[in-house]
Amino acid sequence: MLDILKLSIALTIVAIGSGLVVAFTYYNTGEEIQAQERRNQMEALEAVFPDGVEIKTRSGNNPLPSTYWVAQTDSGLAGYAFKQKSKGYAGDIQVIVGVAPSGEILGLNILSHKETPGLGDRVSEKPSKKYIWNVLAGTSEKTSPWFTEQFKDLSVFEEIKIDKSTEYHTCSDEKKGKLEKTNTITAITGATISTRAVKNCIRKNVPEYLNYLKSSGESS
Amino acid sequence: MIKEELKRGIIAENPILVLALGLCPALAVSTSLQNGLGMGCAATFVLICSNIIISLIKKWIPEKVRIPCYIVIIATFVTIVELTLKAYFPELNNQLGIFVPLIVVNCVILGRAEAFASKNNLGRSIIDGFVMGLGFTLALCILAIIREVLGSNKLWGLKVFPGFRPMTIFILAPGGFFTIAFVMAMINYFRQKKEGGQS
Amino acid sequence: MNIDFISLVQISIAAVFINNFVLSRFLGLCPFFGVSKKLSSAVGMGMAVIFVMTVASMITWIIFHYLLVPYEVDYLRTIVFILVIASLVQLVEMTLQKFSPVLYDALGIYLPLITTNCAIMGVAVLNAGKNDFTQEPYSFIESLVNGIMSGIGFTLALVLMAGIREKLELANIPRPLQGLPIAFVTAGLMAIAFLGFSGLNFFK
């Protein structure tokens, strides 16, 4: 009996000690974690709008999603942002998309995905032309995700076509202009399903949202 | 003495490549050098801290409940690592995913607690935690370098060879198995050659 | 209760084939290589894992959603889960010993090994996270199914591996590859085969 008591006391002390240590750590990091999450959310939003807009969170009723965002400039409404998801190759792809009231895509940001590394996960790839040798020598350059970038300036109201012959980041400027004119994106080699999933994210509900917002006369 | 200890942790008793402990995180996060190094540091931190605490309080822990006590202590440090990563290294935390909480069941850590820290004094336990952690981290980095260069033609996220088409399979699950098989076979080959030469 | 049957089928197929615990998620590798030398012990270990995984996913789900989340102490997740699993394994061992000696004889020696099997902890942590398909937290039934099916997936891989390794014993393998390295190569080849399941999409 005494033995059991001794065992329980030892275990209890260890558990209480660990609980205190963890609680202390949480107390010190909790705020930073929340701030980090807010910052991520903000950065994701800012990336889909042009610079210098004021972003406000709105809650919507059917058919609008429960939360969406409105961006405003001094001269008026700049656009909306919606969170969208669609079934990719393995699990859902979640994106946030910024659109102008006219249906022109302002920016696209992949929030989360479960795509195959090396193939589908290139939806959020940054085309690094940066070689390790250059970095060791001290030269650097800025990169951005090519796949999401090509959606910019396309229209959500028209069917977005998929060109499987090349990848955007290898195209010439002339070809890029042609793609934009024909409302076309290039597919990721070997990952057509992931490409289509991202396209579906945008085409699925966003046009209806925009039409609804327009018809309900919301302009502020 | 330090030199011998280092040799023991990194080569003779390397946790991953020789003892084949802690394989799960070793294969799962060695897709890039950043992840491998991050995981290695996190596990080493937990290993050293738990070794310190366990060697300090080993006298007061009754024999029968020692394993649960060790587990609680390890889990405490894992949670500290988890919260710290979440707060200050969110990207690394996302990459490592569920393998951060799973450090708690990494057999290397519980194994060292049981086999070493519970029997030795503070100084030696710290050294043991350090060299074993170093061995774990180095093994992870070796696997990660091979897989990242072959699988995505990158190192630390930067391109390596111009014009080399990466073999994606190396950063997928099968590549992990092949890489560790190859590294282990190399180690066996050299060891057998050495033994063969001696006899 | 509203049970989404399609989502359960999705979870099952994903857990057994697409995200097979051993061959694609890299969970539970230690027992996978440790206990796969003989077919009979592989089956025993597999059964023990299915059993513990199922019970563990139920209990950890209940604790997580009715204890940790309401009191906002979900940062204690890791500590609580590992303690629950460790004591659960002990409890299962004692219960089996007392009430079902036959089952205990079959599974008994594998149970202590299960505490440090990261597959069990893995399924508990995954169930506390979000469902890959819906991005919603797992419901109780979903996490239960996920537990059973992940265990079955683990057992499938383990039994296949044991069958292959029994035959490998007879093969003439270069000396440096003998033992673990060739087992890793085998696992790699199996993983390639399982890679074929990813992209399986029944319910578009």
Image (cartoon, helix red, strand yellow):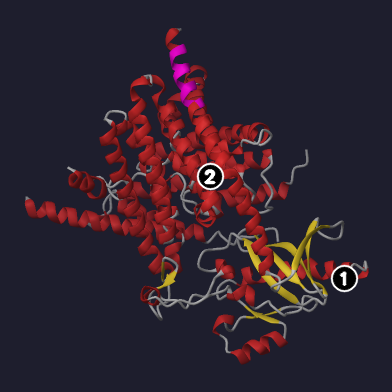
Question: What mark, if any, has residue B83 been given in the picture?
Answer: 2
Side of C95 relative to C129 (left or right):
left
Secondary structure beneath dot 2 equals helix
Q: Residue furthest front?
A: A74
Q: Nearer the viewer, residue B176 or A55?
A: A55
In the rendered image, which residue does mark 1 sit on?
A211
Residue at image point 84% right, 70% down: A210
Q: Which contiguous range is marked in magenta?
A: A5-16
Q: Residue furthest left?
A: B199
Inspect the image, locate mark 2, and give the three-letter code of the amino acid beneath it: Leu
Q: Position of residue B118 (x, y in %)?
A: 31, 29
Residue at image point 58% right, 68% down: A124
The chain identifier of the residue carrying mark 2 reads B
Q: Nearer the viewer, residue C60 or C93?
A: C60
Residues at marks 1 and 2 on the same chain = no
Q: Quadrant of residue C43?
A: top left
Side of C170 relative to B107 (left or right):
left
